Image: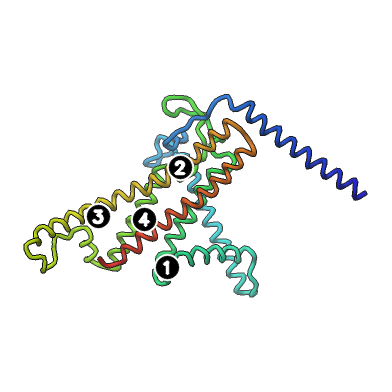
Amino acid sequence: MEKSKGKGSCLIKLLIGIAALGLVGYGFVMPGKELPAISLAAELIPWHLPIPGFEHGIPNTLPTAIFTSLLLITIAFFYHRAAKRAEKTGEESRYLIAVDALYEGVFSFVETTVGKDNATLFFPIIGSFFFFILFANWSGLLPGMGSIGIWGEHGGEKVLIPLFRSPTADLSTTIGLAIITQVTAQYYGFKFQGRKYLKKFFNFSADPDSGALKPVLSFANGFAGILELMGEFIKVLSFGFRLFGNVFAGEVLLMVISFLTAFLVVDIFIALELFVGAIQALIFSILSLIFYQMATQHH
């Protein structure tokens, strides 16, 4: 009896394997008939709302951004409930332990980088950046992203407008995150250094011992400060374009690979994009952390 069950199980696995290989082979032999439209800018869903900025439609990255935010809020809500329950019963649930382990891992990394005092100060915004960008990057890999939509006009042509698109595949989202990063860095600069922080950008002075070179050094310091000020604005662009470019390129790659082949081959690239999405969230968080730490140091 057991032998017959074992043979039946092996036969089912064999049939599944043959079917999977057949589907992959079909993907190679019979690719898609038409490559889906690739849009650099977020498409507008033709839902007109009486709200400033949404009269002509809603960017299809907005619903996904709201969903990502609600997901993080839900995780925090259930974590709070689990923590309250653990205080009453003295027993921690697996969910509470898992979230605590994730929290401690990220916090210990921040603490190792900037020290305990600054880690406590920086962690709320750094953690928010990391988890939002992480889930936003991964949201583009969910089934239905880029394929579920409604017909409408985009670029003067009638195309299928996806209802959902990864928020970080929209330059407006990444630039917005970069602006928040730089504004926060300036806030910490003034918080720790006060008015002296302005000397980083407007310093037309030189050491008293400079002698005859004092005018030259004063001009050089002032010019360097202006370059530093310009650098703060350039950081916004480089920050935003770095994250946007990597996420958008990944989505285009998956779209093209899905058009050329199917199933197991696509799964390999999906696994790669999971890794890239996590790395990009980590890089953005690390660079933000470095900027905050630099802003607190006296020059």
Q: Position of residue 39 (x, y in %)?
A: 45, 33
Q: Is residue 178 above or below residue 124?
A: above
Q: Position of residue 32 (x, y in %)?
A: 59, 27
Q: Is residue 42 above or below residue 271?
A: above
Q: Which sits earlier in the primary sequence, circle 2 or circle 4?
A: 2
Q: Which sits earlier in the primary sequence, circle 2 or circle 1?
A: 1
Q: Position of residue 272 (x, y in %)?
A: 55, 45
Using the numbered discs, state the Cα–Cα distance from disc 2 to disc 4 in whole angstroms: 18 Å
Residue under pointer 2: 169
Q: Which sits earlier in the primary sequence, circle 3 or circle 2?
A: 2
Q: Residue at x 52, y 57 (%)?
A: 73
Using the numbered discs, state the Cα–Cα distance from disc 1 to disc 4 in whole angstroms: 16 Å
Q: Nearer the viewer, residue 80 or 141?
A: 141
Q: Position of residue 189 (x, y in %)?
A: 29, 63
For label 3, count other residues whose C-alpha is less than 10 Å away and answer few (under 14), some (14-19) or many (20+): some
Residue under pointer 3: 228
Q: Residue at x 52, y 66 (%)?
A: 104
Residue under pointer 1: 119
Determine contact: label 2, label 4, CB under 8 Å: no
Q: Nearer the viewer, mark 3 or mark 1?
A: 3
| Label at residue 181 | 4
Q: Which sits earlier in the primary sequence, circle 1 or circle 4?
A: 1
Using the numbered discs, state the Cα–Cα distance from disc 3 to disc 2 in whole angstroms: 29 Å
